[in-house]
Image (cartoon, rainbow, N blue to C red):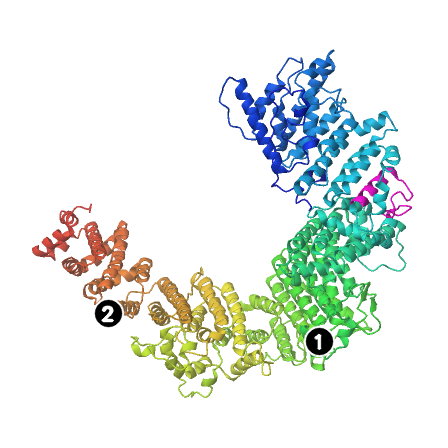
Amino acid sequence: MGSKKRSSNPVEEVEDKVETDTENVAVEPVKKKIKKDKKKENVTADGEGGSSSAVSVKPMERKKKRKELDKERRRAAIGSDGGVKPQPAAVGDSKVGETRGAVASSSSSNGLPEFHIAVFKDLASADVGVRQAAVERLVTELKVVQKAYEGLENKELADGGFKLEAEKDDGLDDCAPSVRYAVRRLVRGVSSSRECARQGFALGLTLLLGGIRSIRLESFLKLVVDFLEVSSSMKGQELKDCLLGRLFAYGALARSGRLLEEWMSDHNTAFVKEFTSIVISLATKKRYLQEPAVAVILELVEKLPAEALLNHVLEAPGLREWFESATDPGNPDALLLALKIREKTSVAGTVFGNILPNPFSPSAFFSSEHLSSLVSCFKESTFCQPRVHSVWPTLVNILLPEIVSTAEDVVSASHSLKKHKKNRKSSSSEEENTKTIQSFCEVVIEGSLLLSSHDRKHLAFDILLLLLPRLPASFVPIVLSYKLVQCLMDVLSTKDSWLYKVAQFFLKELSNWVGNDDVRRVAVVLALQKHSNGRFDLITKTKTVKALLVGFATESGCMLFIQNVTSMFLDEGQASEEPSDQSQTTDDNSEMGSVEEKDSFGTLGNSDSLKTWIVESLPSILKDLKLDPDAKFHVQKEILKFLSVQGLFSASLGSEVTSFELGEKFRWPRAATSTVICRACIEQIQLLLASSQKVEGSQFLANSLETGDLGSYFMRFLVTLRNIPSVSLFRALSDADEQAFSKLQEMETKLYREERNQGQSDEALKLRALRYLLIQLLLQVFVQPGELSETVSELVICCKKAFATSDLLDSSGENELDSDGNPELMDVLVDTLLSMLPQSSAPMRSAIEQVFKYFCSDVTSDGLLRMLRVIKKDLKPARHQEADSEDADEDDEDVLGIEEDEEIDEAETGETAESEEQTDDSETVGEVEEGAKEQTEDSDDSDSGMDDDAMFRMDTYLAQIFKEKKNQTGGETAQAQLVLFKLRILSLLEIYLHENPGKCMLVNLVTSLFILYAWMPQVLTVYSNLVQAFVNPNTTEISEQLAQRIWGILQKKIFKAKDIPKGEAVQLPTLESLLEKSLKLASKPFKSKKSTSNSLKKKESASWKRHTMITSLGQNSTFWILKIIDSKKFSEAELQRVFDIFKDVLTRYFQTRNSQIKSGFIKEILRRRQWIGHHLFGFLLEKCGTGKIEFRRVKALDLVTEILKSMVASGTDESNHNTSKKILKSHITSLSHLVKDLVTNLPEKQSKRAEVRKFCGKVFQTLSSHDLTKSFLKGLDAETQDTLESKLGQVFVNFKKGERKL
């Protein structure tokens, strides 16, 4: 029944509770004088409402009577006008009403000013401005009329004129007839539900009562009762209209200030009591009248002094009884009225019944006992939703009377979010406020509203939004309680929930309230995560906590967060007040099962879940943190200390240890930390160090060595803690791991000293990169116990050899790289780095890449080729495990691994038993059988040239990839692991290409990558993981990623690189072979199968996509190789093999349809490398005339045209002009024969004929520009010339005349 609008004044908004389908009564003023005959006394001239005797008439009967009355009036009008035709006018026609009103009011026989009755029409307008203007005009005119009326000596004369329905016994004897009419009409109008009639007529009453003192209060109250009489026969809308009309009339009286004036003039007046009693009586009639009725009384309360409230309002009949009965059924309006009166009067006693405590005080009112007695009142306040009941802002004002200052907020929050120390004594007022807000939240929010209906849950969130603007951060843990957070999670976990948008809005407002206040931010984040066990965002599917953590922008805010989450981690008030069925303590987790069981996240309890979030959230605040380097380094150190203490160490005695060297006290949880949490801490330390290394690398040369070296700080901190007797590592190290740990620690110290000696130089950068790799490896020892001893030894040796100083080298006999015959330092370093890649974490890979970046310029050819062999390495499928390997010889000339077959016949489309599932296009299917025979050759080829040590290292890499996979089921396959390993090596190759552009080794690199990428669709080598990605549907997604990565390296780092391979090492035969294979790739055909199956269509689409990429790869490779050839400045004789390659390609293009090379591709080659076009000019002229395929012959004309364009463009230079002329003259005969053949045998299609004419025009233009017109015509007989003239028309005629304009 409540209104759907929000409004600050319930009196105005209650009008909206009436349904819109009620009768709209129009205004129709009286046209003629009211007769003195009492029989027509009850006939109303105003359609807004009837007299008191007609109120009980039913609406339909009233309509009939109005129609009859309207007919009589029109008949009378016809008679008085002398037979004028009556104008049809419906009941309520405003224009007719205005005319009649003007006639009635403009009579000057009574000597009063004019009053325009038409103004009543605008009082019901929906436009506020229109209503207000109408009211002002109404009141202004009536004041003038009343003043003039009071100045008349003979008032009986004025009353005898147009009295406008004013009766002599209505108590308004001192008012002018217009005023009497206006009062009566306004009273009737407040009961109308038409548009905004109630608001407009009530406003008119308010100003009229306040502006004209001649309207007596007793008369006004009598008129309200008479005109808006409520009878027992009234029902539905009619009853509502009368009740709401009374309410608005009484509200107008309260706002007018007349009651205050009456009391001021007479302290014993009875109007205040009578008015209060009437309104209270009205409030008891209907539930929807209760709140607006109290609002009317509160209008009066605000105006009256305390004395009047005590002696009149509180003494009004029925008020005390209303207060006494408020608690049982639940009457929030009585509570509101009592609070407002008590606030103004400070009255004590039982005048308010049990609704307020006696004596009253905020602490007594908000006590658990008293709030429990008011629960029904709180619940019933939801009837006006979605608007919040007026009682709640009042309660909030009492609960939190003022906003806590920022300084006090910071201090109180910093203490309240941590566990209170025993020796700390808070002030009595702080304790009282805390107790009050806690009682309110527990009884009202949690115990009453959240446990009830959706409407009451909605109300709970609205109340909290009222609290937020003045809520100190220290009260956030009380307000965001366990039950509230659980309610939020329940609602937000399901989008279909009725309260979903309500909860979303609450979180949005909560985030807005936090703003830039870090104290509030910490309080909110800890409350949400504490009661959700660190999974608030995960359960609610929002990013609330994540967004709040990103918002830290100050060092003090970060430090406050670190201190509070540390306290939470240490079990200080960590457990939720309402533990769930799944909650377990840290102690339980620490004693449950074996280490392996604890390492599984599936066995984590709620406590470990929260601790895991704490560990992961600390480094996350640094992600977008923008602070000066010193402040950020301070924050990093605090996070690093927490992670190191909790993840790497444990206290042997007790849970607290003091380090006198560091001057700090370190604490651990009372229960042992689980292995899962320790490993999480180590991972976050690695991430923190990796992130710090990237930032330091970019700022290294600009800063000193001491600034921001987080790795050095970590090692010093680690050593210091290890030296404390009562502190031990969380995991006991084996002898081998202990030795590795010591080696890494010792070498890091030496490298640190050497780095400081080097100053700000490139050598210092290398040293720092190695140091951070050592630190990452040291941390990895805890994660992979017993697995890294050999890797550590090799890396330490590499460090000693790389920086062969007296400080780093020792006489321990470990310098195994000194003697001749042992591998190079960089080869060992590359092998060591590769051995760490397979199972390395992201931070470890970052450190490896940093080391490789600074040392890759010294990588040998063997080291680089070893990396490429790993990329080429692949697993043998089960059906090829026993394949013969006798044919291990390799065709060294087949550099790209592409077969020399000239044609592709139908036999290539045969199928194998697995072709339907493992192939993507018809061509691949045909090559599976042939490819299977050559897989052994390819596998042996990938290992060719490797010595025993290299083979052993290769097997070591692969062994690490498949380690721990033997007994694993349902995890990643070995093939997928190998693909990931290849992707990591590709990252190193990309770094190498970036740091070493243009090295001649790139040719071999392109060769190796080409083997992988070019042959993926043909399935000729199963040892390439990328080939299996296209063949095996199970690895399509993974291999697609690998293919895209290789594609990116080729495009960005090789083809589009600024530098190209140079030097004597780049041999022309190698480039010729690469060029030939690239052109074969670019011309490779694509065969598709006709199928209606959706799955086969998808496969064919994927196959076409790969074919397009391979074709594009062949084209780009051709451009790149020709660029290298062009840069070498070979002679024409040396380039003869290159010309022959292009001739073979063009021959296949003209003779067979299997060649799918694009003419546009060849055209682009001729445009970029004009020397090729000039040499192939005669060959193309011949093929255009003798080619078997007419379509391609015509398309090839574009190639000749492109060559001709280059000759015309080069004509600006004299030497080039002569060269072009020489070429044209040498081929003038072939050119004339081609033109003759083309024109004599024009194609049938009009488009092809246009191309031939265009070509001929270009030939004539080129010959004319080189003065070869006569030479060309000599080769044509007269008959041929006539044919050309007839076919080509004016173009050939102009050419013969020697004109250049064609």
Q: Is residue 1082 left or right of residue 577?
A: left
Question: Hey, which quadrant is residue 230 in on the image?
Answer: top right
Q: Is residue 92 left or right of residue 521?
A: left
Q: Crowding near pointer 2: few (<14 within 10 Å), some, many (20+)?
A: some
Residue 774 within the magenta-colored segment of the rendering: no
Q: Residue at coordinates 63% horizontally, 37% vertically from top-left? A: 59
Rendered position, 1139 above or below 139: below
Q: Is residue 203 visible?
A: no
| Residue 77 placement (x, y as % from top left) | 55, 21
Q: How many marks?
A: 2
Q: Crowding near pointer 1: few (<14 within 10 Å), some, many (20+)?
A: some
| Residue 998 placement (x, y as % from top left) | 45, 64
- Extent of the magenta region: 333-362
Rendered position, 878 above or below 459: below
Question: Hey, which quadrant is residue 347 in on the image?
Answer: top right
Q: Is residue 7 visible?
A: yes
| Residue 1190 placement (x, y as % from top left) | 21, 64
- Residue for badge 1: 598
Give residue 1151's mark.
2
| Residue situated in front as seen by the camera: 311 or 1090 | 311
Q: Is residue 553 left or right of residue 1123?
A: right
